[in-house]
Image (spheres, helix red, strand yellow):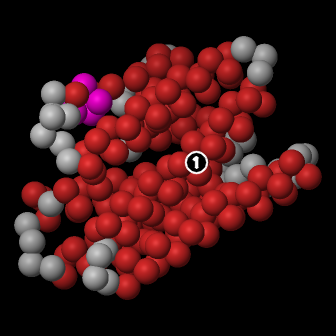
Amino acid sequence: MPDKSALNIVSTLFILLPLWYNVGKMKEAGLLGRLFFFFLSIGLVTDLLMWYFHENPTEGVSRYLFSIYSLCEAVFFFWLLRRIGEGTILFKMAGYSMILTPIVWVITLVVSLTFPDHPVSGITFDAIYEVTASFLAGFTLLLLAERDVALARSWQFWFASGIFCYCFCTFFVMNLVGTQLSITLWPLNNFV
């Protein structure tokens, strides 16, 4: 079995591959490509900061940093799914999700600050947005399959597949938080 710390380092730095690939394409990239590059960069900085705060005696900071990143991630996913679903019911569902996400985030933040010792106070927001994003991404994949497009060449297909796999898998891993299985599987989350 590989060294756990080596796997954590590799999984955190794995994001450098798509970042490096996209640096050369920034001139041709449209708004979506640049926003995706920015999103990946924020993810890398967040992972590195969480790594730093986890290794130093300020672990509480990493929890709030991750919470803020989760909000940004959810809004970006819903925005992207909304853009893919223009002209369909998905457009409205993703739009409502974008509007409700910050409200739900604030509510779960207030609950977690009010009841800090409650075991689910910190994971409630993530569970809500991951289930919602998985559903919307799955719905997006069905819509794309109904269209007459070559799925393997469609950027929408790959983004929706990535959101679906990431959110669906993360939801199940996060339900195992605190268990040995969760601790073992968590570094693999960055590879998805």
Q: Can see residue 7? A: no
Query: Which quadrant holds residue 55?
Result: top right
- Could you tell me residue 115's position as x and y percent? 91, 52
Choose between 130 and 24: the one closer to the eye.
Answer: 24
Q: Is residue 102 left or right of residue 45?
A: right
Q: Position of residue 72 (x, y in %)?
A: 53, 48
20 over 36 or under it: above or below = above
Mark 1 lies on residue:
70
Q: Residue at x 38, y 77 (%)?
A: 91
**Residues in magenta, as a range:** 18-22
Say which element carries label 1. Answer: helix
Please name the residue shown 38% across and 37% down the image: 38
**Horizontal placement of 70 versus 160: left or right?**
right
When the figure is inspected, residue 144 is found, relative to residue 34, above or below; the finding is below
- The reply to whether residue 68 is in sight is yes
Identify the residue at image location x=41%, y=62%: 79
Image-quadrant location for residue 85: bottom left
Q: Position of residue 121 (x, y in %)?
A: 80, 53
Image quadrant where one finds the C terminus: top left
The verdict on residue 20 being magenta is yes
Residue 105 position within the rendered picture, expressed as x and y whole percent measured from the top left: 68, 58
Residue 49 placement: quadrant: top right
Q: Residue at x 37, y 85 (%)?
A: 89
The amino acid on which the numbered mark 1 sits, given as a three-letter code, is Ser
Membership of 191 in magenta stretch: no
| Dominant secondary-structure state across the stretch colored magenta | helix
